[in-house]
Image: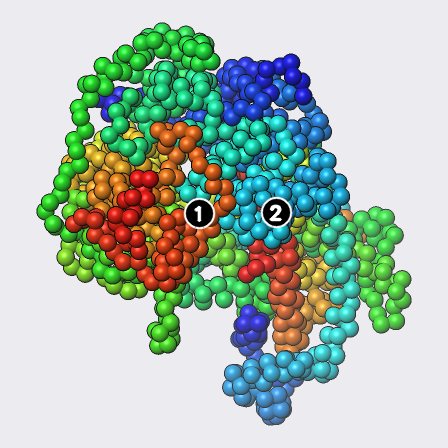
Amino acid sequence: MSTEIQINSDQLEDAPISRFEALKRVLRQSPMSFRIGGAIMFVHVFIAITGPFWAPYDQATIFTGPPLMGMSWEHLFGTDMLGRDVFSRVIHGAHLVIILSISGSFLGVALGTALGLLSAYLRGWFDEVVMRLIETLISIPYLVLALLLVTAAGPKYSGEPTLVVLVVAFVFAPRVTRLARAAGLDVVMNDYVTIARLRGESAWSVIWRELLPNASGTLLVEFALRTGYAPVLIGTLGFLGFGVAPPNPEWGLMISEYRDLVLASPVVVLAPALMLASLIIGLNMWTEGLARILGRSVRHEE
Amino acid sequence: MNNSSPYLARLEEIHLSYRHDESWLKVLQGVSLDIAPGEVVGLVGESGCGKSTLARLLLGYRHPSSRIESGRAILEDVDLLGLERNSLDGIRGRRVALVPQDPTTALNPSMRVGAQIAEVLCEHGDEKSEEEITARIIELFENVGLPNPEFLVKRFPHQLSGGQQQRVTIAMALACNPSLVVLDEPTTALDVTTQDQILRLLVQLRSRLGIAMLYVTHDLGVVAQIADRVCVMYAGHVVETAATERIFSEPRHPYTRGLIGSVPRLDLDQDKTARPLRGLLRRSQLPKGCPFQPRCDFTEPSCAEVHQHPVEVASDHYVACQRWQHVEQEEQTRLKDVPESSPVTELDGDDPLVEFDDVSLSYSQPGRLDKLIGYSPLTVVHDLSFTIRRGEVVALVGESGSGKSTIAKAVSGLLPPCKGQIKFNGKPLPGQLDGRSEEQKRTIQYIFQNPDSSLNPRARVRGALGRPLAKFFAMKVSEITSKIAAALEEVRLPKTYAARFPDQLSGGERQRVAIARALVAKPSLLLCDEALSALDVSVQANILSMLEDFKKDREVAMLFISHDLAVVRSLADRVAVLFNGLMLEIGDTSAVYAPPYHPYTYALLQAVPDIERRNEMHENIIEQETSSGGRACPFAGRCQWKLGSQCETTPPPWRKVTGKHSIRCHRELDNLTALATD
Amino acid sequence: MVTLLMVSVVVFAAIEIIPGDAATRYLGRDATPEALEVLRERMHLNDPAHERYIKWISGAVTGDFGTSLTSGRPVTEVLAPKIFNTVILATVAFLVYIPFSVVPAVFAAANRDKLMDHMISSINLLAVSIPPFLLATFLLILFVITFPILPAISAVTDESTVGEFAIAIILPVMTMAIVMAAHTMRMLRDNLIEVFDSDYIRMAELKGMSKHRVLLRHALPNALGPSLHITALNINFLVSGMVVVEKVFAFPGFGRELVDALLVEDQPVVQATVLLASMVYIFANLAADLGSMLLNPRLREQ
């Protein structure tokens, strides 16, 4: 008797909204930083994807005009010391920087996630070994590690975009591993993981079904955050002469190449600098908003 | 103080809302409450009814995302809701003080406890010099029964036990002799016996200091011990107010009746005057009129439309129900319809399912070197031997730290025994999970205490129930879907719930899903680890009756772990009492709940706040520390019937009361019977 | 200690895999095989790798890092003055950084979600987003070119007076302090807000403590502990930042020495600098652990 009544009273509850509806609701209430950051990012991604098709000149063509001619309609951001069109170089640079950043941080986060979650679930000697390794790599300052790696790769590979991606991934991976492990440990404490373990599920099954979905919020924020760090690292490497080789139009490299020209034509330095800064600001704002939506805090480090 | 007003504090027609997404959710809807000087008022209701929010208004505290639409909170003729922060600082701690729910989080972890009280005295007290303040703190510590106060003032919170921390917060509240103390579920986070001690302390302080108290709790048993008057809240409304004696003997509101009916009793033979509550409080489906209408058994159509005002049904007894006159009569006829609950089925067939043979458990596994030098790591459970028969419910009862969950872990394969053996179905059960067969993994299922953590928040109910089906029975998708529907029905949930995520379920519903997940594996043994402890009484009562049905219908054995003797009373066939990892008593349920008792069982039974034993507190305010009690009887340090040195030196012998009931104690059985009946 | 030892292995291995050996680098590509062989023998390059590692690390423990390949002087002698310069720069930056992070964090947290908080957080977001080399470049353009009040390069020598030194480090210090403070301020604000939400803060309010007392006596000590670890991380960041900043401002310090050594593959100098950089980080972490132990009595007992 009371059974039926109870089911009835429970059904009075309005049907739960679908996840898609929930997503729409979240986006409608999304914080300002998420929207502004998203807009800036959209512009950057748009330029990165379509830019190569409508950029007025090729990035490497020299003497498209007289060197260091300043701003004009033919050359929006002027020309550099070789007469290359700076506007086109900046546009092509967007393409390069965004591809490098996303692939580098994706690789690093994927590697770190797999290692971190496995370490959190298995514990024991595997965890010990991974943690020692991580500690070692983290204690080398990240830029020093990156520079060391570029040097170790030798002159044959240095300057290759692929090497830059690998270096970014390698520098990020230990830091992501540490985070993923901590997030994984939080999830492992829950009884549903114990239940899965008692059911005799394999380690990968538990990680895939139980750990990953519950750590995904943290890891998503981490990926967004890392994608924001990647251009910094890539730019710094380029600036110091350890990144992609000239004549690649990487912004950090351009800033370093044009630094001495600042008196003659300030715009050639400012253009890549502002592009880089706005990309990072946009990404960081977006990350901030994303984190707030997901109820996670952003842990800025390095 | 103004003597002209008959009350000390008064909440007047409070309407308060919380911000919820974009809208405002009404949490308090026209609540009024008086407290006279020196009076103890109990504020009772289920979680989410708004009782804590209401109580904190008496401290002038509002949550930042809440809004007061109307009403006043008056303390000694001052409306606290109109005051600025600066003026409130002068009242809080001085005129009105708070005892928080969980002392472990309410004390600043980086300050010594003495300093935390000293700052209250500095800001508000009359004592100014350092010596005076120190003397006052020590006096306060003595008043709240803290042993060795000079030593304790210098400690940090984490160095104190939970009971001691709560005594510190009580001392802090009393520091400036406030006229009102608000106690917000002050014993909920504590063990039964510690709760009992704190309650005794509060009763004693009340009679000695004459301070008015507002005692907020979900536990009717606790209110019965301490309150002069009880105020029952439901969904932001006060539904009934009366003197404590009256509210238990003549409850008028259907909700109050249901609440009292839901309380698990130690005494099963008592005539039930009311039935347990059904359903759940859902804020989203409150009708315009009586908020309780959707769950009420006595409702008439107009209930949902007409706002219910409190009516004085007897002197100082107010009820907000238009049908209060009919309730009593209708309940009597209904109760007659209910079939007598069948007595506990006697299991005569001696068909053991699980056998513990001299099992000891420890969290640190001895290393090779340790084995070599004969070092044995700290054991949590010692020399445990007992059996669970097929289809039998055995309850393991004890305080936190008694090792009861550890035993369940050992059966489940999470913790291999460091000594002895567990047999399952007559065969030795491998200690490690990896060594067990698929069949063994399937037939032993675990239900955890906390429904929040036992379901994957990112998996739908369908996924949670489908996984064991796919894993153990290799079922096809279509088959799984129909099985899930059946499983949900069995735990009395609609089958549409299969598409829900855990955050779209209430705590009780989640626990039902967790039970369903265990049942779909067709287990022969369920390990219920405090499976009901995190739930409200009414939900608890419902799930308990559900489990009783499973026991009858499905012949599933249970190892039912609980700290609450009252909860297991109706469900268990046998009860085992555990203390510090040692089993002290085991026997058929009815035998354990009757003399002769083991001294610890007796202490536990005495500590259960029972609504039948109202205001019968004897004074005993000094905290009894749990001592390890030497190597012999672990309970010796706390035993009120301790014989002498032999309790601390020699292990107590098992004494057989009847064939199935045994007590492990140095005292003779006749002696124990005599002591308990005195 | 174990970590430091592992760092040394990693550094040694990284240098080891660089194509071409030290002798070739020292004598150049045109060297005769005989000359190379003689040099290899003298530099013990023909010994197996693990023997050379043991020789190097036992030297390192006693402070002997070998001889610089480019200058021919002992590594210690080459590095000592650079380290001295860097330590002064870092210390000043560190002292400036502490108030710059704590004060705005407390103001932002105390006025949570109000105008003040939003303003501080926005400025903070900008500061977090700008890569150090870009910030350095901007500061350079601003104070050297637009308002020429400071020298463009901070090239101090042994003969520089204290006054010259002070002026020289203004810009590097500013860059470092801003970048580090941005990260810590953010962390401290979040920690403070988390602490503000705790039960014991509400308890302190409800026992009638004034706003100031709640903030300074109850909240701040509990929020500082986790922030100390961020400060330790910042040391890591500081070292990475030094590399960039010293390069931009041509400041003769440790970081610039590292970059230069990497560029010419001066193996002993690289090994010594990386090892020292990691050592700084490891000790900073240790110090942070000790510090939070002092703040948190619960950790003190363990």
Residue at 56% across, 79% down: C20
Residue at 54% across, 88% down: C47
Residue at 25% across, 35% down: B570
Question: Which residue has dot 2 on it?
Answer: B113
User: Residue pushed farthest left?
Assistant: B349
Q: Are marks 1 and 2 on the same chain?
A: no
Q: 10 Å neighbourhood of mark 1: few (<14), some, or many (≥20)?
A: many
Residue A300 in sight: no
Q: Nearer the viewer, mark 1 or mark 2?
A: 2
Disc 1 marks a residue whose amino acid type is: Ala
Q: 10 Å neighbourhood of mark 2: few (<14), some, or many (≥20)?
A: many
Vertical arrangement, residue B58 with respect to residue B386, above or below: above
Question: Which residue has dot 1 on it?
Answer: A215
For this view, does B445 lie left or right of residue A286?
Answer: left
Q: Where does residue B661 sit, x and y in percent of width and height? A: 21, 48
Q: Nearer the viewer, residue B516 or B338?
A: B338
Q: Which quadrant does the C terminus of chain B fall into?
A: top left
Disc 2 marks a residue whose amino acid type is: Val
Q: Where does residue C77 sit, x and y in percent of width and height? A: 75, 79
Quadrant of the rendered image containing residue B247: top left
